[in-house]
Image (cartoon, grey):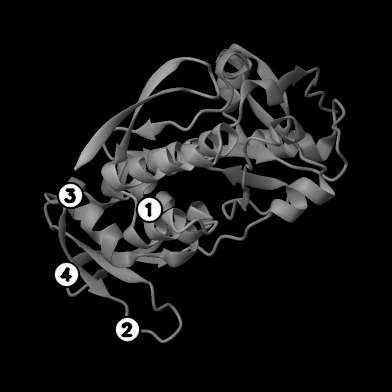
Amino acid sequence: MKELIYYINNITGEDEHCILNKKLNNYVNTCFDKGIDYGSKQRQFAIEMSDYYGGEIPQNILDTFINENYVDYIHENLSTHNAPLLQKKLLKFFSNSINRFIDYDGTIEIYSFYIIVNNDVNVESFKKNKKLLDLLQFFNYKIRETKQIENENVLFIEPIFSENVDDWVYKNCKGICYHFTTREAADNILKTGFRIRNNAPINIPTRNYMYATDKLSIRSGDEYVNAFIDKVTNVFDVTKYELAVLRIDLNRARGNRYITFYKDTAMSEPEAVFTYNSIPVKCVKEVNYKQIKK
């Protein structure tokens, strides 16, 4: 049974609604008996956790939280590699494309498996399907290769092992990150902050990607930064809508939230990180950066 909880969004100040299950709601209500600050903190954590899982919080995560033990639910999801749950979600949205799954029988890649694609499906188009890629990313999996086995189209799915990089972001980089985007996107972020946004209809959150450097600041024309920007932005969008660079000071969020970061394994640069947490607008400001190229 789920219950509709009414609350004020701590990021935007707007009235919003969030679906919390009854057990979680009852626990949050008891937290206010220990004080408004504690209750508000636990409620916000519960809301973000529920948003992250699309309202379907795994029982072990829920029990750990209710027993008042800290749980890094994002790291738990990224490191668990729950292949059965991923397969269940894949069948829910791609039952017309997927014939069956076959577990990988190797000794090292114990979390890997094969997707057998129906013969009437264009496998090249299927493996580029955004919903498919978003689901794999959320469960921290990727497509390693496509091949044919006994006249069947097969996708080999393997796990990605994410590394928590909070020490890098908060200690080496002093809680300072950068985000490279277009002018249009930057204008929205400067109004609302970085928000957790669920991808409909698969109901999983999007990642917020950042650039965290121990140099603490970036200067216009830096060749290394320019190369990174070229990798993470669409050159046509930047040319059309203009490049915008946002500086995120996570120290301004301290006290009411802790934002966790992970290595972006799709990028070779150590500065490439991401978070599944929302970042309040008070942490974000635009900086003057010109992508001057020699």
Q: Nearer the viewer, mark 4 or mark 3?
A: 3
Q: Is residue 36 left or right of residue 148?
A: right
Query: Distance from label 2 to label 3 (Cα)?
Result: 25 Å
Query: Distance from label 2 to label 4 (Cα)?
Result: 20 Å
Query: Distance from label 4 to label 3 (Cα)?
Result: 25 Å
Amino acid identity at mark 3:
Lys
For disc 2, the marked residue is: 105
Query: Distance from label 1 to label 4 (Cα)?
Result: 25 Å
When asked about the image quadrant of residue 58, the answer is bottom left
When asked about the image quadrant of residue 3, the answer is top left
Instruction: Say which label, 4 or 3, has the lower sequence index.
Output: 3
Q: Which mark is residue 151?
A: 4
Amino acid identity at mark 2:
Asp
Provide residue 222's location: percent of width, then percent of height: 85, 33
Instruction: Say which label, 1 or 2, has the lower sequence index.
Output: 2
Q: Name the residue nearer the viewer: 244 or 291.
A: 244
Which element carries disc 1, helix, strand or loop?
helix
Amino acid identity at mark 1:
Leu
Q: Quadrant of the C terminus?
A: top right
For disc 3, the marked residue is: 92
